[in-house]
Amino acid sequence: MMGAGPLLPLKLSLVILFLFSVAASVQCFEKKVLNLQNLQWKQKNGISNFLPQKSRREKGATMLEIKHRHYSGKTIDWNKKLQKSLILDDIHVRSLQSRIKNMVYGTVKDISSQTPLTSGARLQTLNYIVAVSLGGQQMTMIVDTGSDLTWVQCQPCTSCYNQQDPLYTPSISPSFQAVLCNSSTCQSVQSATGTSGLCGSNSPSCNYIVSYGDGSYTRGDLGSEELNLGTTTVKSFIFGCGRNNKGLFGGASGLMGLGRSPLSLVSQTSAIFDGVFSYCLPSTGAGDSGSLVLGANPFLYKNTTPITYTRMLPNLQVPTFYFLNLTGVSVGGVPLQAESFGKGGILIDSGTVISRLPPSIYKALQTEFVKQFSGFPSAPAFSILDTCYNLTAYQEVNIPTITMYFEGNAEIDVDVLGMFYFVKSDASQMCLALASLSSKDDMGIIGNYQQRNQRVIYDTKESKLGFASETCNFNEA
Ligand SMILES: *[C@@H]1O[C@H](CO)[C@@H](O)[C@H](O)[C@H]1NC(C)=O
Ligand SMILES: *[C@@H]1O[C@H](CO)[C@@H](O)[C@H](O)[C@H]1NC(C)=O
Ligand SMILES: *[C@@H]1O[C@H](CO)[C@@H](O)[C@H](O)[C@H]1NC(C)=O
C-alpha cells in the first residue's frame, strides 16, 4: 500500500516514455515521396529529340535551354541503356582518376593501358546539351565543367562522327580567323589541354589535341570566331576546329568547355558575364528541360530554397576542375560520422553520373540508409551500385532525405529523382544512386545525378559555388 502509490505513476510514465520514444524513432527520419509509376512511364517515353532549343536574355545574363541528350528514334532497350551508362560511368571515373593522378604526381603512365579502351565514355555520360551559333552556323554542344577547350567538328574533316546539324565550315564564314602557332593564344593551349599547341606541317595554324583519357579525343586547329549564345555575341571566341574526332558524342556538334583555366568559355567571356555561370540539370523524362545561365542574374533562377555558398578550393596542379570541401552528410536528418569529412577536396563535375564518395563516408551513408529504408525486398547489386531493391510491388515509396554539407554551411538537398538509379526500367532493380571510391586516395566526385533539380552557381571571380533547390524548367512560368 505504501509503495504502490508513487510506483504506479512511475511505471506508467516509463511506459509512456518508452512508447513515445518508439514512435519518435519511427517517425523522426525525414523522408521524401518517390512516385514510381510516374517515373516508369516517363522512362518508357523518354525519347526526346534535338528540338529547336530556346534562349533569352535578361539584365546582362543570357539563358540557354539545357536538355537531356537525345536518343535515336529507334525503340530503346531501356534496361540495356540504363546498365550500359553505369558501366561507362565507371570507365569514365577510372580514367578521370588516372588523369588527376598524372597531373598531381606527374606519373607519365599510359592511361589507355590502365582503363579499358572504350571510346567516348566521358562523352556518353555527359548528357546535357545546349544550342548556340558559331559564325552564324547552328551547333549543339555538350556542356562540360570538367574540360576547358570548346570545340566543334569542322569541315574539311579527316574523321568525324555522325552529328545532327551540318558540320561547321570555316571557309564560308567571314568572321573566322585561324590562330597562328607563334601566338600567345597557342601557348595557352598547354594549360587547357595538357598538351602544348604545335605548328602544323604545312600551315602556320595552331594545332591542338585534347584526349579525354578514355580513348576519345579531338584534334584540329584553333580558330577565332563569332559565337552567339542566345542573344549575346562573343567576338573573337577561341575554339577548336576539330578535324579528327573520335568518340560517340551522340550527335552533338561538339563540346562547350566550362572548366576553370584561361581558354574555357567562362574565362573567355568574363568581360561579359563576370566569370559567373549556373545551371539546372533536368531529369531524363521527355520534355524535361533546364537552363544554363551565363552571368549572374538571380531573377532568372527559380530556386525554391535560398542560395547557400561554399568556397572553391584552389588546386594549382589540376587547374581545370572545381573542388569543394565536403564537411558532412545527413541521411533522413541524421548526421553521419566519418573520418574523411573536411579532408582534401571533392570535385563537382557535370560529366560524371553517380557521385563517388570516400569509403568511410559511403560506408556510414549506406549503413544509415539501409537502417532507415527498411522492410523493402532487396535486389542484386549492379556494377558500382551495391544497395538495391525490388520495388515492383510499390506505387510510391518514402525515401530518407540525403543532404550534403559543404564548408560555410552550403548544402545540397538531393532531389528525390537523384536518389535511386533504375537498373531495370520496371523497378525490379533500383539502387541507391551513390557509390564508394575504391581507395581513399582517389578523388571524390559529386556527379550529375545528385545535381538534378538544383540551381548550381559557379562564381569563378569570387571563387565560390552556390546551391539551391529548383525544379528545372526553362519555360517562363
Ligand atoms: C607569326 O608568324 C607570322 C607569319 O607566319 C608573322 O607575320 C607574325 O609577325 C608572327 N608573329 C609573332 C608574334 O611572332
Ligand atoms: C574544410 O572545412 C572544415 C570546417 O570548416 C575545416 O576544418 C577543414 O580544414 C577544411 N578542409 C580543407 C581541405 O580546407
Ligand atoms: C520482384 O518482386 C515481385 C513481387 O513483388 C516478384 O514477383 C518478382 O519476381 C521480383 N523480381 C525479381 C527480379 O526478383
Image (cartoon, rainbow, N blue to C red):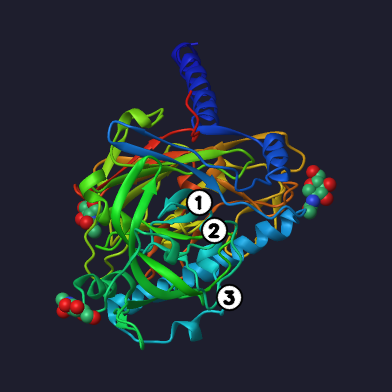
Amino acid carrying label 2: it is: Ala
210 over 340 or under it: above or below: below
In the picture of the structure, the residue carrying the numbered disc 3 is 118
In the picture of the structure, the residue carrying the numbered disc 1 is 129
Percent position of residue 53, x then y: 52, 42
Q: Nearer the viewer, mark 2 or mark 3?
A: 2
243 over 393 or under it: above or below: below
Which label's residue is closer to the chain start, 1 or 3?
3
- Mark 1 touching mark 2, by CB under 8 A? yes
Amino acid carrying label 3: it is: Thr
In the picture of the structure, the residue carrying the numbered disc 2 is 252
Q: Is residue 343 left or right of residue 429?
A: left
73 over 309 or under it: above or below: below
Residue at image point 55% right, 52% down: 433
Counting other residues with Cα less than 10 Å from the Cα at mark 3, is it few (<14), some (14-19), or many (20 or more)? some
Amino acid carrying label 1: it is: Ile
Asked if residue 225 can be seen in this view, the reply is: yes
Counting other residues with Cα less than 10 Å from the Cα at mark 1, is it few (<14), some (14-19), or many (20 or more)? many
